[in-house]
Amino acid sequence: MMPVFNAGAYLDPAIESLIAQSFRDWELIAVDDGSRDDSPTRLREWSQRDPRVRPFLQRENRGIPATLNFALTHARGEYLAFLNHDDLAKPNRLEMQLAFLREHPKIDLLGSALENVDERGATIGARSMPTSDLEIHWLALLDCPVRQSSLVGRSEAFRQHGLRFDENVASHSDYDFVARAIRSVAAANLPEALLQYRIHPKNSSRVRRDMFVESGARISFDAIRHELPDFPITLDDVRLIRAALLGYKKHGQQLQLPALKRAVRLYLDLFAAFAQKHQGHPLLARLETLSPQVLTA
């Protein structure tokens, strides 16, 4: 499933990355969300070239959550895979993820590590993601543990647990979705980077950045309250932890040493509470040996 809005030069490479998949039995539900450029025309052209591309055109811009929920209603496959219009799937992405899901029937949501690329598609870095369900639950307290563009899930799990995107969440909707979904289903990430995540000026404007930071803090706060209802923490505390340890700062925000020290104390207290809840879990010893940077990567 691909939400499309003013995709520009990124749309064709994104679709081409699906055409190049080693796994061939797929269909692309591409929903244009009221684009003002030529994205609708190009989607129609792609559908004429490859019948696996199924375009849907919305006259008005409804936002990514509503667009993805619309796509979910038209999905017909056993598995659901997501890809944003500006990202790229590695050629073996679907083959590897579907093989894993078939071999691990208890896992319903699966992502992967990421390769960051620039506007031209050149690699500019990599991002590892937590691979086990426990690590995913830990990271979900502070950040999105499974990236939307790398996500593959079982259709039955979506139906059985009513998994949908919250249309009231305008920014960081993937984080909100995953944080809620893992309360009902088990998730994992493959350690291989099967997705090229594009970083470009359109996703780093001041207004978008500030909205992204604030929305993420509120989702994080809700996740902590759900996972650790007795843990004493405020929304301002969450904002501080995410700013100091993850770099989620609003434009112009500066942190002094006392604030940084408080953020570290809050982080360690949060982990102690999480470890206490999951005491005895076989992976907990591994988590305790990881640095904060790895735990929140």
Image (cartoon, helix red, strand yellow):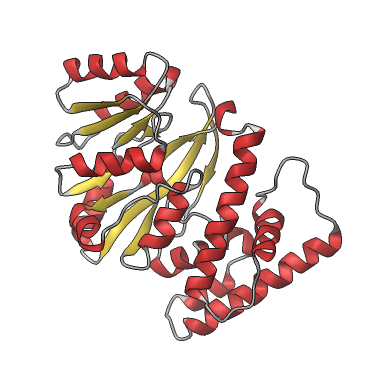
Q: Which residue is at the far front?
A: 60
Can the viewer see residue 239? yes
Residue 131 visible, this angle = no
Q: Quadrant of residue 256?
A: bottom right
88 relative to 156, above or below: above
Choose between 194 and 269: the one closer to the eye: 269
- Image check: 53 left or right of 188? left
Q: Position of residue 38 (x, y in %)?
A: 37, 13
* Residue 245 image offset from top left, x and y in percent: 68, 57
Residue sitting nearer the eye, 284 or 77: 77
Q: Quadrant of the image for the N terminus? A: top left
Task: Examine the image and state in which quarter residue 199 appears.
Answer: top right
Residue at 40% of width from left, 54% of height from top? 177
Q: Residue at x 43, y 22 (%)?
A: 6
Quarter of the image with the C terminus is bottom right
Residue 218: image x %, image y %? 57, 58
Q: Residue at x 46, y 43 (%)?
A: 114
Horizontally, is 148 left or right of 125 in the view? left
